[in-house]
Amino acid sequence: MRAPEEVIIRPIITEKTNRLMEDLNKYVFEVHKDANKHEIKHAVEKLFGVKVKAVNTLYARPRIKRTITKKGRVFGTTRGYKKAIITLDKNSKIDLMSL
């Protein structure tokens, strides 16, 4: 089993994830691409000292981006990553601003 610091890469903080945190007590993290739900649950409980109720994962696929330069159109891709949506118990909270 991996160390918790290797499993959780970073929290994802956007307007949508802020609404999830406030309304549904769900937190979104970018995780290692090979991590499974059990490893993610163990890592969050160990790093933040909270009780995890559920873990949902998805793979954000790479998107095609294009830019126009002097040489013409250049195509590239964003990087793909795996993210986990962590649902906590009612009593648990994570302070992401202290990270």
Image (spheres, grey):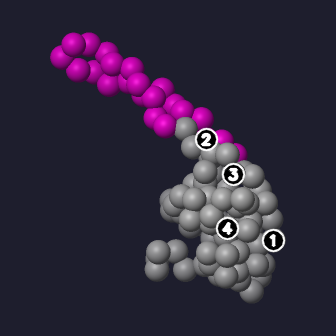
The label number, if any, that marks residue 53 in the structure image: 1
Mark 2 → mark 1, Cα distance in angstroms: 23 Å
Instruction: Please tell me whether mark 3 sits on a helix, a strand or a loop.
Output: loop
Disc 2 is placed on an element classified as strand
- Mark 3 or mark 1, earlier in chain: 3
Residue plotted at (51% across, 31% down): 63
Q: Which residue is mark 2?
A: 60
Q: Quadrant of residue 73?
A: top left
Q: Earlier in the sequence, mark 3 or mark 4?
A: 3
Q: Real-space Cα distance between discs 2 and 4?
A: 21 Å
In the picture, measured across the screen, residue 61 lies left or right of residue 40, that is left
* Magenta segment includes 37: no
Which class describes the residues within 10 Å of circle 1: few (<14), some (14-19), or many (20+)?
Answer: few
Name the residue that disc number 4 marks: 43
Task: Find numbered disc 1 in the image and state the secondary structure of the residue it sits on.
Answer: strand
Which of the pair 8/69 is nearer the observer? 8
Q: Is residue 61 visible?
A: yes
- Give the main secondary structure, helix, strand or loop, of the magenta stretch: strand
Q: Dot 4: what SS?
A: helix
Q: Nearer the viewer, residue 25 or 77?
A: 77
Q: CA distance from mark 2 to mark 3?
A: 14 Å
What residue is drawn where x is 56% and y is 65%? 5
Q: Which residue is mark 3?
A: 35
Which residue of the protein is positioned furthest toward the left in this rendering?
70
Whether label 3 touches label 4, CB < 8 Å: yes
